[in-house]
Amino acid sequence: MTATHEAPATPLTEKVVEAACPQDCPDTCAMLVTVDGAGTATSVVGDPDHPYTDGGLCVKVDNYLDRVHDPGRVLFPMRRTGPKGSGRFERITWDEAVTEIATRFTTPTSTAPRRSCRSTTWAPRAS
Ligand code: SF4
Protein backbone atom coordinates (compact mmCIF):
# COMPACT_ATOMS: atom_id res chain seq x y z
CA MET A 1 0.00 0.00 0.00
CA THR A 2 1.37 3.39 -0.91
CA ALA A 3 1.00 6.57 1.08
CA THR A 4 -2.14 8.50 0.20
CA HIS A 5 -0.36 11.85 0.04
CA GLU A 6 1.80 11.02 -2.98
CA ALA A 7 1.33 13.14 -6.06
CA PRO A 8 -1.14 11.66 -8.52
CA ALA A 9 0.40 9.83 -11.49
CA THR A 10 -1.36 12.24 -13.81
CA PRO A 11 -1.11 15.82 -12.53
CA LEU A 12 -4.43 17.54 -12.15
CA THR A 13 -5.10 20.58 -14.23
CA GLU A 14 -6.97 23.68 -13.20
CA LYS A 15 -10.70 23.35 -13.65
CA VAL A 16 -13.92 25.17 -12.86
CA VAL A 17 -16.44 23.25 -10.76
CA GLU A 18 -20.14 24.08 -10.60
CA ALA A 19 -21.27 24.30 -6.99
CA ALA A 20 -24.03 25.59 -4.76
CA CYS A 21 -23.44 27.97 -1.89
CA PRO A 22 -23.06 25.93 1.31
CA GLN A 23 -24.39 28.62 3.63
CA ASP A 24 -27.58 27.89 5.53
CA CYS A 25 -29.61 30.13 3.26
CA PRO A 26 -32.72 29.43 1.16
CA ASP A 27 -31.34 31.12 -1.97
CA THR A 28 -28.80 28.35 -2.64
CA CYS A 29 -26.94 30.51 -5.17
CA ALA A 30 -25.01 28.77 -7.92
CA MET A 31 -21.24 29.26 -7.79
CA LEU A 32 -18.31 28.55 -10.07
CA VAL A 33 -15.26 27.40 -8.10
CA THR A 34 -11.87 27.38 -9.78
CA VAL A 35 -9.66 24.58 -8.46
CA ASP A 36 -5.93 24.46 -9.18
CA GLY A 37 -3.85 21.42 -10.07
CA ALA A 38 -3.32 20.59 -6.39
CA GLY A 39 -7.07 20.50 -5.72
CA THR A 40 -7.15 23.86 -3.92
CA ALA A 41 -9.97 26.31 -4.59
CA THR A 42 -8.50 29.55 -5.92
CA SER A 43 -11.59 31.48 -6.98
CA VAL A 44 -15.29 31.55 -6.11
CA VAL A 45 -17.71 33.60 -8.19
CA GLY A 46 -21.42 33.57 -8.84
CA ASP A 47 -22.59 31.56 -11.83
CA PRO A 48 -23.72 34.06 -14.50
CA ASP A 49 -26.10 31.42 -15.89
CA HIS A 50 -28.01 31.17 -12.60
CA PRO A 51 -31.45 32.58 -13.47
CA TYR A 52 -32.26 33.95 -10.03
CA THR A 53 -29.06 35.65 -8.88
CA ASP A 54 -27.51 36.23 -12.31
CA GLY A 55 -23.91 35.71 -11.21
CA GLY A 56 -24.13 37.50 -7.89
CA LEU A 57 -23.05 36.23 -4.49
CA CYS A 58 -23.89 38.08 -1.30
CA VAL A 59 -21.41 39.62 1.14
CA LYS A 60 -21.49 36.49 3.31
CA VAL A 61 -19.68 34.64 0.54
CA ASP A 62 -17.53 37.43 -0.92
CA ASN A 63 -14.56 36.43 1.24
CA TYR A 64 -15.30 32.71 1.19
CA LEU A 65 -11.77 31.64 0.22
CA ASP A 66 -10.25 33.79 2.97
CA ARG A 67 -12.32 31.90 5.52
CA VAL A 68 -11.76 28.47 3.98
CA HIS A 69 -7.97 28.91 3.90
CA ASP A 70 -7.68 30.80 7.21
CA PRO A 71 -5.15 29.05 9.49
CA GLY A 72 -7.51 29.67 12.42
CA ARG A 73 -10.42 27.84 10.79
CA VAL A 74 -12.03 25.29 13.08
CA LEU A 75 -11.53 21.86 11.53
CA PHE A 76 -12.54 19.60 14.43
CA PRO A 77 -15.36 19.48 16.96
CA MET A 78 -14.57 21.62 19.97
CA ARG A 79 -16.29 21.71 23.37
CA ARG A 80 -16.37 24.93 25.34
CA THR A 81 -14.63 24.44 28.68
CA GLY A 82 -14.96 27.90 30.16
CA PRO A 83 -17.55 30.63 30.41
CA LYS A 84 -18.91 32.01 27.17
CA GLY A 85 -16.49 34.49 25.71
CA SER A 86 -13.48 33.05 27.53
CA GLY A 87 -12.23 31.36 24.37
CA ARG A 88 -11.48 28.12 26.21
CA PHE A 89 -12.24 24.98 24.23
CA GLU A 90 -11.03 21.40 24.05
CA ARG A 91 -10.90 19.23 20.99
CA ILE A 92 -13.28 16.25 21.04
CA THR A 93 -13.87 13.42 18.59
CA TRP A 94 -16.65 13.42 16.03
CA ASP A 95 -18.28 10.51 17.89
CA GLU A 96 -18.24 12.50 21.14
CA ALA A 97 -19.71 15.52 19.38
CA VAL A 98 -22.53 13.53 17.75
CA THR A 99 -23.32 11.77 21.03
CA GLU A 100 -23.38 15.04 22.95
CA ILE A 101 -25.61 16.75 20.41
CA ALA A 102 -27.96 13.75 20.22
CA THR A 103 -28.18 13.67 24.01
CA ARG A 104 -29.10 17.34 24.13
CA PHE A 105 -31.73 16.86 21.42
CA THR A 106 -33.32 13.98 23.28
CA THR A 107 -33.12 15.44 26.78
CA PRO A 108 -36.54 16.71 27.84
CA THR A 109 -36.51 20.45 28.04
CA SER A 110 -37.91 20.26 31.55
CA THR A 111 -34.66 18.67 32.74
CA ALA A 112 -32.22 20.41 30.40
CA PRO A 113 -30.26 23.38 31.67
CA ARG A 114 -32.32 26.51 31.12
CA ARG A 115 -30.90 28.65 28.39
CA SER A 116 -32.81 31.25 26.54
CA CYS A 117 -32.47 33.87 23.91
CA ARG A 118 -34.44 36.92 24.68
CA SER A 119 -34.99 40.30 23.27
CA THR A 120 -33.27 43.24 24.88
CA THR A 121 -36.72 44.76 25.22
CA TRP A 122 -38.09 41.79 27.11
CA ALA A 123 -38.79 42.26 30.78
CA PRO A 124 -40.43 39.94 33.29
CA ARG A 125 -43.92 40.73 34.47
CA ALA A 126 -44.17 42.33 37.85
CA SER A 127 -45.70 39.87 40.24
S1 SF4 B 1 -24.43 33.55 -1.75
FE1 SF4 B 1 -25.45 34.55 -0.05
S2 SF4 B 1 -27.60 34.76 -0.74
FE2 SF4 B 1 -26.61 33.20 -2.05
S3 SF4 B 1 -27.06 31.23 -1.05
FE3 SF4 B 1 -25.05 31.94 -0.32
S4 SF4 B 1 -25.51 33.01 1.59
FE4 SF4 B 1 -27.43 32.84 0.45
Image: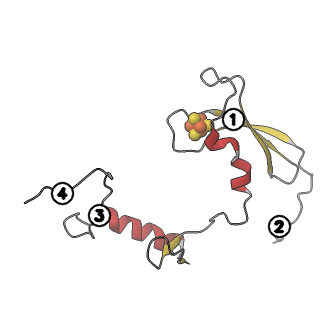
Q: Quadrant of the C terminus?
A: bottom left
Q: Are marks 4 and 3 in contact (CB under 8 Å)?
A: no
The residue labelled by disc 4 is 124
The residue labelled by disc 1 is 31
The quarter of the rendering in which ligand 1 is drawn is: top right
Residue 2 occupies quadrant: bottom right
Q: Where in the figure is residue 122, as x and y percent of width and height?
A: 26, 52
Q: Where in the figure is residue 26, as x and y percent of width and height?
A: 49, 35
Q: Helix or strand or loop: what does disc 3 sit on?
A: helix
Q: Helix or strand or loop: what does disc 4 sit on?
A: loop
Say which label, 4 or 3, has the lower sequence index.
3
Q: Residue furthest left?
A: 127
Which amino acid type is marked by label 3?
Thr
The residue labelled by disc 2 is 5
Q: Helix or strand or loop: what does disc 1 sit on?
A: strand
Q: Is mark 1 within 8 Å of ligand 1?
A: yes
Decide: few, some or many residues near mark 1? Use Cα within 10 Å; few <14, some 14-19, many ≥20: many
Is residue 45 positioned above or below 51 on the image?
below
Looking at the image, which residue is at 45% across and 66% down? 98
Is residue 82 positioned above or below 74 on the image?
below
- On the picture, is 123 further left or further right than 17? left
Which amino acid type is marked by label 2?
His
Which amino acid type is marked by label 4?
Pro
Q: Are marks 3 and 2 in contact (CB under 8 Å)?
A: no
Is residue 104 positioned above or below 11 on the image?
below
Q: Where in the figure is residue 64, as x and y percent of width and height?
A: 69, 47
The residue labelled by disc 3 is 106
Q: Is mark 3 within 8 Å of ligand 1?
A: no
Give the CA distance from mark 3 to mark 2.
40 Å
Give the CA distance from mark 1 to mark 4.
47 Å
